[in-house]
């Protein structure tokens, strides 16, 4: 029997392990953080690392991990760092087996990790049933990594039981098309070539404060407000309607109003209940207490644009022709370079070609739904007719 080192930061889990296998001489159990610096090397690393989104970490933890791990970029999840640490600890002929969510196959924050894994060599990815962890919908995957280099193909086992062998690209934006057996070619033009901005909607960090029903909004506050829409309010085959307004403490060019300029909005935000909710947001450690999580680019938002909800059974798009709506964080908005093309562009986005591309590339959510992402939308193939051609003059 080989020597086994068990590591966990949860004392209660260590106690359970000691009760079961603590008497075995070859087993060493450590109440430690696996992500802490360590020098030991292992022939096998096996685990089910914790799934902790960035929102579950303190600001100091996020900064600590960003300094120590290349995978700690964007809106990273803690299990990505466990992958990176395990690769560091693996001996040259070692093997790593992890059970994690499948999201590392396609989310932007895992791009560096995908490069590391592909260059090391992935022997197999087995997608297992989404109900494997009871009530937790994680779309889990069992990943087996061997130190064999990127030239080796990876065995893919789908949830349907189908098996295929693919070569995973170390620099790929997403591995999902490869996993699903779809051939992808780099298109001549992509969606971002025809749009000024493709982005997720405004994140206030406190919609319960800044978003109010239109009928309930006091007259003095209307000067600071705009019509707003959530993903839930975007209904397929119905006209674009909203019953809410968002109060925005910014100028149209994106400058945050000073407290002295807030006027009636400042009086509203300083109410104890409102201010208390605003002060609980993580962004107040680096921004004024009434600022949004992200500065809203109103110059782009308040223009004719195309909207789509961030999660759905299939992606679909609708036109905000007047450009009066400020989408919330559960809505994506696409601002065309040429507004005269907006309806034709929207029709193309609702085509089977785009739907198939997004279904193949996008992140999975609960109940088989897909979650859109800006970097995937930007790379949707685009027909040449939508791209402005340079005008040449001859003298």
Image (spheres, rainbow, N blue to C red):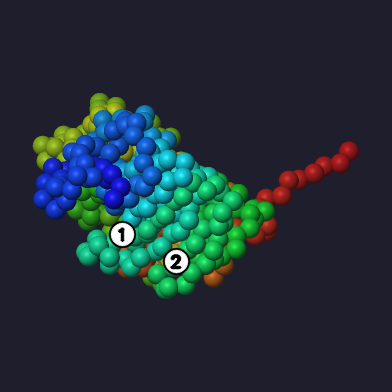
Q: Is residue 203 visible?
A: no
Q: Position of residue 39 (x, y in %)?
A: 34, 31
Instruction: Give how far across and how far down residue 116 sits, in percent.
Output: 48, 43
Residue nearest the observer in this picture, 254 or 286: 286
* Residue at 14% over, 47% down: 23
| Residue 364 visible in rendering | yes
Q: Residue 370 bears which disc, if any?
A: none
Q: Residue at x 19, y 53 (%)?
A: 216
Q: Which residue appears at 26% of the width and 30% of the height?
A: 60
| Residue with the mark numbered 2 | 157
Under tag 2, what secondary structure? Answer: strand
Residue 128 occupies which quadrant of the picture?
bottom left
- Give the class, few, some or many, for how many residues have Cα within 10 Å of label 2's Cα (few <14, many ≥20): many
Position of residue 274 measured from the top left corner of the image (x, y, whole percent):
16, 40
The residue sitting at the right extreme is: 395
Helix, strand or loop at label 1? It is: loop
49 vs 73: above or below? below
Q: Residue at x 60, y 60 (%)?
A: 184
Q: Nearer the viewer, mark 1 or mark 2?
A: 2
Q: Residues within 10 Å of mark 1 (few under 14, many from 20)?
A: many
23 with respect to 63 (left or right): left
Residue indicated by mark 1: 138
In which image quadrant can residue 320 be found?
Answer: bottom left
Q: Looking at the image, do the residues carrying marks 1 and 2 touch, with CB atoms under 8 Å apart?
A: no
Instruction: Give the image location of residue 103, x and y in percent.
Output: 39, 54
Quarter occupied by the C terminus: top right
Using the rendered view, name the quadrant where residue 8 is placed: top left
Horizontal side, residue 130 vs residue 150: left or right: left
Which is more toward the observer, 379 or 137? 137
The residues bearing labels 1 and 2 have C-alpha atoms spaced at a distance of: 17 Å
């Amino acid at each position: 029997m080989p020597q086994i080192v068990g590591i966990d930061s949860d004392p209660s889990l260590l106690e359970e392990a000691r009760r079961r296998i603590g008497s075995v001489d070859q087993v060493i159990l450590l109440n430690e953080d696996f992500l802490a610096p360590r020098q030991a090397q292992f022939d096998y690393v096996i685990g089910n690392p914790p799934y902790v989104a960035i929102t579950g970490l303190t600001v100091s933890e996020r900064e600590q991990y960003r300094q120590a791990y290349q995978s700690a970029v964007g809106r990273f999840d803690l299990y990505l760092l466990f992958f990176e640490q395990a690769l560091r600890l693996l001996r040259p002929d070692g093997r790593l087996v992890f059970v994690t969510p499948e999201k590392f196959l396609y989310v932007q924050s895992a791009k560096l990790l995908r490069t590391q894994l592909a260059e090391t060599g992935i022997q197999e990815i087995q997608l297992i049933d989404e109900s494997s962890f009871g009530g937790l919908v994680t779309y889990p995957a069992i990943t087996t990594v061997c130190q064999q280099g990127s030239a080796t193909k990876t065995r893919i086992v789908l949830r349907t039981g189908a098996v295929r062998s693919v070569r995973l690209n170390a620099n790929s934006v997403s591995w999902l098309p490869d996993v699903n057996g779809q051939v992808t070619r780099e298109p001549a033009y992509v969606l971002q070539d025809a749009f000024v901005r493709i982005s997720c909607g405004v994140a206030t960090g406190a919609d319960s404060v800044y978003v109010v029903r239109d009928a309930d909004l006091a007259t003095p506050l209307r000067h600071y407000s705009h019509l707003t829409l959530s993903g839930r309010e975007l209904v397929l085959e119905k006209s674009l309607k909203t019953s809410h307004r968002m109060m925005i403490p910014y100028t149209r060019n994106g400058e945050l109003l000073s407290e002295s300029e807030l006027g009636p909005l400042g009086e509203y935000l300083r109410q104890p209940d409102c201010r208390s909710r605003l002060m609980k947001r993580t962004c107040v450690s680096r921004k004024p207490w009434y600022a949004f999580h992200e500065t809203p680019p109103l110059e782009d938002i308040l223009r004719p644009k195309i909207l789509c909800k961030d999660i759905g059974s299939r992606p679909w798009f609708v036109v905000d022709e007047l450009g009066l709506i400020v989408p919330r964080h559960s809505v994506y908005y696409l601002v065309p370079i040429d507004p005269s093309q907006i309806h034709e562009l929207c029709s193309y986005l609702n085509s089977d070609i785009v739907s198939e591309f997004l279904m193949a590339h996008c992140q999975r959510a609960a109940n088989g739904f897909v979650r859109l992402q800006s970097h995937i939308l930007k790379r949707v193939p685009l027909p040449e007719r939508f791209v402005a051609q340079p005008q040449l003059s001859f003298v």
